[in-house]
Amino acid sequence: MVIGRLTESVLRGVDRVTFGVTSTISESFLEPTLRLGVTGLSGAGKTVFITSLVANMMDRGRMGRMGAVASGRIEAAFLQPQPDDTLPRFDYERHLAALTGPDPHWPEGTRQISQLRLSFRIRPGGLLAGVRAPRVVHVDIIDYPGEWLLDLVLLDKSYADWSRDVLARMQTRDFAADALAQIEATDPAAPHDESTAQRLTQSFTAYLTAARAAGLPDITPGRFLLPGDLAGSPVLTFVPLPKTGGRGSMGREMERRYEAYKRQVIQPFFRDHFARIDRQVVLADLLGAIHSGPESVDRLGATLTELLAAFRPGRNAWLTRLLGGKRVEKLLFAATKADHLHHSQHARLTALMTALLRQSKDRADFAGARTQAMALAALRATVEEQHERSGETLDCVRGRLLDTGRQAAFYAGELPEDPMHLLGPARDGAARWLDADYQIMRFAPAAITRKPGDGLPHIRLDAAAEFLLGDWLG
Ligand SMILES: Nc1nc2c(ncn2[C@@H]2O[C@H](COP(=O)(O)OP(=O)(O)OP(=O)(O)O)[C@@H](O)[C@H]2O)c(=O)[nH]1
Ligand SMILES: [Mg+2]
């Protein structure tokens, strides 16, 4: 029974070690942590969402739809130093000051991934309520650009395949003409020359920027648009070329950099950040797209499909291997900025978001994850009003206009009851909406007077938080 004894002593050894560990390392190591990813394309509303979520979890007066708030189980919520030393901290205080200061304004656009740790002290429920001490749980919130998810398609693509696809699409787009002309004038077999590489990258990046502004989904490499501290480095200095050429050639060097981009930029993001996310919210400015017209709605649908590929097990071999069966448990799709609409239309906006996603995905694709779609406003900038026009009563919203600072009431137009009345023309390539015009105005954040205990005004942020965190805090 040598083996038996050996196992026993090993086990005892393990016991001792475990005991030693518990008594020496910091408590927080043992406290449960949930990682909540917040993503969406540029301008979707990520920064405002996180800022308002945190403010409303700390002062919970407006979070009545959360079970743990209604039952009083949350004793306290507080910010803690974040656990990852190498990630920038989400600058909550600065964003909150922008939104709630004497001259309220929207926070600046974000160029980076960032993280914030929000901790909760939860009172035990049920029979043990009076006996057990409160427990502490952490929610690590990660803000990252949706554009980075779009890079996933590159992992399974060779440089030659990527170049062929990108160049073919550029042929069909007017605004690609300059970048395309420069690429076509380049001989891939000529010796590599850094200033040419930089010039080509500049015009190619201008093309990508225009493609993004047009709402197009194929905007790889995503980091060219949000370079952060990699700006100007060789790994972000390459373009698609029709051929690769021999050693030392332009084409060969571009191919090398493309592979380095995959290995040193895309893979670390998915490995170090994406793979560790437990729950995810994907934000989309659906109202903005509706305002821009059918083509924008169609493109938003296509972009969301592309972006959501990251959450579909099996779509990418490398990612599937990396995740090894791990999935996000919950996925929330939220149409943001719902305060542009009177509440009588919110259900229709939710129906549109649901239909847009249904068009682009099969629900079964997310097997294992609970999904939900909703319309919300992380920060409500308007109040509701009714106005008469030609004998008709219109449900309006009123707010302070961003451009002029003046108060204005505004009727956005009525969303159709059947989402297909918008999604049909969008899919069929209609140039404009047939029987309606959807307006949108940019409102500044309203000056807020807060009662003690109240967070920031919002629409359905508590329902979103209940879906994402309710069971975790209950
Ligand atoms: N009315 C209203 N406008 C909003 C709301 N949330 C965001 N916005 C508007 O959308 C803009 C973009 O919001 P951000 O939170 O900065 O978006 P983001 O996704 O962080 O954008 P990037 O950092 O550029 O990727 C803001 O400047 C506001 O104009 C909201 O709840 N209500
Ligand atoms: Mg941001």
Image: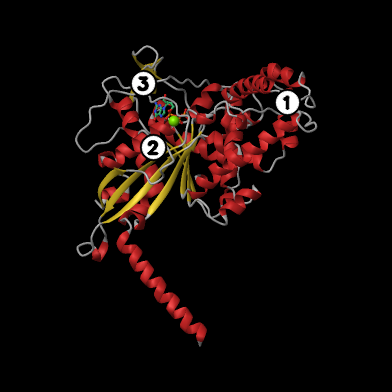
The dot on residue 336 is none
Determine whether label 3 and label 2 are within 8 Å by CB: no
Q: Taking the image as drawn, is residue 423 in sight? A: no
Task: Residue 412 in the image: state x and y as whole percent.
Answer: 44, 22
Q: Amino acid at mark 2?
A: Arg
443 sits to left or right of 257: left
Task: Residue 178 in the image: state x and y as whole percent.
Answer: 69, 16
357 sits to left or right of 414: right
Given residues 460 and 187, the one toward you in this image is 187
The residue positioned 37% from the left and 38% from the top of the image is 460
Q: Is residue 175 above or below residue 238?
A: above
Of the image marks 3 and 1, the number of the one nearer the N terminus: 1
Given residues 7 and 438, the one toward you in this image is 7
Residue holding disc 3: 444
Residue holding disc 2: 89
The residue positioned 57% from the left and 56% from the top of the image is 324
Q: Nearer the viewer, mark 3 or mark 1?
A: 1
Q: Quadrant of the C terminus?
A: bottom left
Q: Mark 1 near ligand 1 (CB under 8 Å)? A: no
The color scheme shown is secondary structure
Determine whether label 1 and label 2 are within 8 Å by CB: no
Q: Amino acid at mark 1?
A: His
Number of numbered labels in the structure image: 3
